[in-house]
Amino acid sequence: MTETDTEKSNRAEPDSLVALVPVCWDDDEIELLADVHPDVWAEPLTIDSGAGSQQVQLQVGDCDTCVTLQVDDAIPELVDMVATAKQPFTSSEAIQLEKHRAVWRLTMPEISDDPIARCHGFARLVTTAIEAGAPGVFFPFCAQLHSPRLVKHLAVDFSKPPALINLYVNAWNDDAWMVTRGLTVLGLPELETPTDSGLNDAYFRLMDVAAGMLLQRDAYPPDSRLQLGTHLYTIERGPAGPDDELIPLCGAFGRLSIVRPD
């Protein structure tokens, strides 16, 4: 399927959730989602193909925003990202990913009006695709490929912000700083923190603060002080660390630094 310039523009909006789901079945298997979804989530999934439309509209339960589904060509490069997954792919999942025949592009626009509810609805749909047999999911806004095992693990707690943050937000680092990638889509500033206490410590610090911002649906103001573990940190206006050259859109709503007070 081809897409218009308007559709290309819409998918690049900073507050739109986009998931690329590799599939090993034919285009006409979209109804499979409607069959699997009620068994997984005990709610309906309504599908509107729309006469003559290149996109399918999906209504997830009582979620007030529809998800569009568009079938794209396979992306062979997804296989190269298996090694970067937060939880490993099994051998069979990696083989299925290599054999995928198409990519289902799922898009939910304007989620920042009600980020938790809409992120939850979108996550349920992604999980349904995984339960139906999709061998993974790639979120382009955070450049992260997730294994089916991670998605199913997080699905147990999708009603809680930490699970949604782990699904939608990634982090990258240089020698001195670790920076989030994905909070922009939730209508929030990205975060950065020094890595002098170790990469694991920096990562969990970022995820904790990110979950807190999602829960309160707002960023911490500069000069805020947060107790994280046994240490006190200050929120400062950033960036102090490196620019995100891979996805420059990240940071459209700014960046905050999490640092130890002087």
Image (cartoon, grey):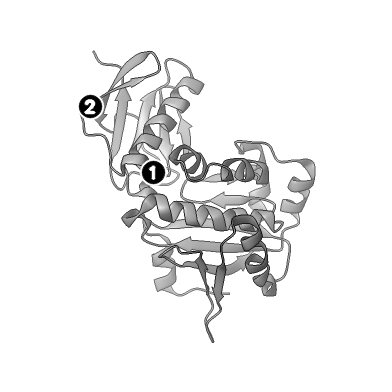
Q: Quadrant of residue 100?
A: bottom right
Secondary structure of the residue carrying numbered label 2: loop
Side of 236 where 144 appears, left or right: right
Inter-mark Cα distance, 2 to 1: 19 Å
Which x, y percent locates residue 2? Answer: 54, 74
Q: Is residue 150 visible?
A: yes
Q: Residue at x 54, y 86 (%)?
A: 51
Which x, y percent locates residue 180? Answer: 42, 36
Residue 224: numbered disc: 2
**Viewer-proximal residue among 154 and 61:** 61
**Viewer-proximal residue among 173 and 225:** 225
> Label 1: few (<14), some or many (≥20) within 10 Å?
many
Q: Residue at x 44, y 32 (%)?
A: 207
**Viewer-proximal residue among 63 and 194:** 63
Is 133 above or below relative to 211? below
Which x, y percent locates residue 10? Answer: 39, 66
Q: Residue at x 39, y 66 (%)?
A: 9
Q: Amino acid at mark 2?
A: Ser
Residue 231: numbered disc: none
Q: Check disc 1 and report the residue beneath it.
A: 183
Side of 212 where 35 appears, left or right: right
Q: Amino acid at mark 1?
A: Leu
